[in-house]
Image (cartoon, rainbow, N blue to C red):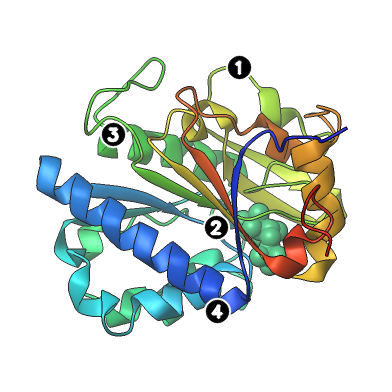
Amino acid sequence: MRVEPRARCIVLPTVEALAEDAAQRFARAAGDAVHTRGEFVVAFSGGNTPRSLYARLAAPPYASAVPWSEVVVCWGDERCVPPDDAVSNYRMARETLLDHVPIPATQVHRIRGEDDPVAAARAYEQTLRSALRTPQGPPREAPGARIDLVLLGLGDDGHTASLFPGAPVATNGDSWVAAHYVAAVSQWRVTLTPVIINAAAEVLFLVSGASKAAIVRRVLEGPLRPHELPAQLIAPADGRVLWLLDAAAARDLEGQSP
Ligand code: 6PG
């Protein structure tokens, strides 16, 4: 019996092709949003996978094709470390992209990983609410009131952003940002919650490598178990979620095996 993936997937032959496809989608989304309302709000993912995308965006043709001066950057999650720490998601994005394109510093909203995690999460929620013109209450779908594009990765345990298996933050009420200690990585993390991620105009998962094949299949074709597989919590209301996979990460999906 053929099992349909529960989300739209595009499989690219290599990780380089994946980065190029993602860069084209990023540039198109940015151009459309800036043309429509003069601003593009993007939530960056952390980890390693997005490095190749950020590096591509920092180089021709994207370095000049994207309207960087109208781009507003936030993060889907952050490790609770100083901004110059080797594992900081902010540092990775700054080194691979932000230092190379003309985004005004006032439009780069990093999560203050150096602060007390709970205070940092509370402060970030206010920062995000201000950027999205929604001082209180649930996310709004009005233009300018939601993140235009959320970039996400997938951990081999089914986490995304810093929504880890079994973590209460994954389903905690109406907060937009939460902090929690993640025993699996022995770190405090600050993360956007599904409440605000699922209100985004578009969500783009970038997943590459054979080590992710098994978890990709569990998340996309296995039973719905969002408490165990928080990536299954990501289901934007109007369905704008796309999984960009390289062939190695997609190899266990139905219909992908040679
Ligand atoms: C983080 C990320 C996290 C990441 C996955 C995949 O802060 O680590 O936000 O959710 O996307 O762990 O990481 P890789 O791309 O390194 O496999």
In the rendered structure, which amino acid carries the disc numbered 2? Gly
Whole-number angstrom distance, CA of label 2 to CA of label 4: 30 Å
Give whichever of discs 1 and 2 has the lower sequence position.
2
Residue that badge 1 annotates: 173
Circle nearer the N terminus (2, 4): 4
Of marks 4 and 1, which one's residue comes earlier in the chain? 4
Calculate the distance from the C-alpha at mark 4 to the C-alpha at mark 1.
39 Å
Residue at 60% across, 17% down: 173
Q: Are marks 4 and 3 in contact (CB under 8 Å)?
A: no
Instruction: Confirm if mark 1 falls within 8 A of ligand 1.
Output: no
Q: Are marks 1 and 2 in contact (CB under 8 Å)?
A: no
Residue under label 4? 16
Name the spot of residue 118 as percent of width and height, x first: 59, 39
Please tell me which of labels 3 and 1 falls first in the chain: 3
Query: Where does label 3 land, which residue?
Result: 132
Q: Which residue is mark 2?
A: 113
The residues bearing labels 4 and 3 have C-alpha atoms spaced at a distance of 33 Å
**Front disc: 4 or 1:** 4
> Can residue 84 be seen in this snapshot?
no
Mark yes or no: residue 20 visible.
Answer: yes
Comparing labels 1 and 2, the label whose residue is closer to the camera: 1
Of labels 3 and 2, the one closer to you: 3
Question: x, y (%) of residue 226?
Answer: 77, 29
Q: Amino acid at mark 4?
A: Glu
Question: Residue 129 vs residue 162: left or right?
Answer: left
Q: Amino acid at mark 1?
A: Gly
**Secondary structure beneath label 2:** loop
Q: Nearer the viewer, mark 4 or mark 3?
A: 4
- Residue 149 lies, in percent from the top left, at 39, 46
Q: Is residue 57 above or below residue 149?
A: below
Disc number for residue 127:
none
Amino acid found under the numbered disc labelled 3: Leu
